[in-house]
Image (spheres, rainbow, N blue to C red):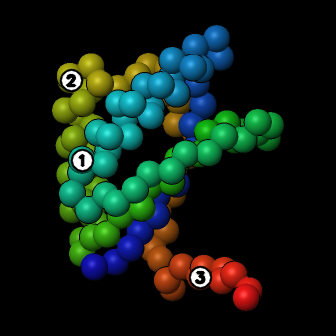
């Protein structure tokens, strides 16, 4: 299995509804995405002062897979299904997305004694 990280930069299409957008993302979208086989965790961050053309929000999705294309096909099928079920939000604007394959295990800072 290979460990992968997907980064997704987003904005809310209506700044007056950012709270609603974030509640949907955290309460509906993240659990839906994590239901995809191989998905391990999701972490979200906010950039209070995003530069031109950048997203205010960053989501990091970590997953394990033997076949990246197959995992992404399943996720895409799920996204289509969620769209048909009304589980996607028109408030979400995706700015960018990238895939990264892990090259080395995490390095954890050890406490000095």
Query: Who comes first in sequence, dot 1 or dot 2?
Result: 1
Quadrant containing the C terminus is bottom right
Q: Which of the two marks, 1 or 2, is nearer to us in this view?
A: 1
Rendered image: mark on residue 84: 2
Residue drawn at x 21%, y 57% is 37
Residue drawn at x 62%, y 45% is 45
Considering only vertical position in the picture, is 28 above or below 99? above
Q: Which of the two marks, 3 or 1, is nearer to us in this view?
A: 3
Query: Who comes first in sequence, dot 3 or dot 1?
Result: 1
Q: Secondary structure at mark 1?
A: loop
Position of residue 107 in the picture relative to residue 42 (left or right): right
Alpha carbon separation for disc pair 3 and 1:
28 Å
Alpha carbon separation for disc pair 2 and 3:
41 Å
Give the total number of marks visible in the rendering: 3
Residue at image mark 1: 35
- The image quadrant of residue 84 is top left
Residue drawn at x 64%, y 11% is 16
How packed mark 3 is, by other alpha carbons closer than 10 Å (few <14, some 14-19, many 20 or more), is few
Q: Secondary structure at mark 3?
A: loop
Question: Residue 81: image x %, image y %?
Answer: 19, 32
Residue 57 in view in this figure: yes
Rendered image: mark on residue 107: 3
């Amino acid at each position: 299995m290979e460990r992968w990280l997907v980064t997704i930069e987003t904005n809310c299409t209506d700044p007056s509804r950012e709270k609603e957008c974030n509640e949907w993302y955290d309460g509906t979208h993240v659990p839906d995405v994590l239901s995809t086989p191989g998905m391990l965790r999701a972490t979200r961050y906010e950039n209070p002062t995003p530069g031109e053309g950048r997203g205010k929000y960053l989501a990091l999705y970590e997953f394990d897979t033997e076949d990246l294309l197959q995992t992404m096909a399943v996720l895409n099928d799920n996204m289509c299904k969620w769209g048909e079920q009304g589980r996607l939000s028109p408030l979400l604007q995706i700015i960018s997305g990238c895939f990264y394959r892990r090259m080395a295990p995490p390095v954890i800072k050890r406490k000095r004694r």
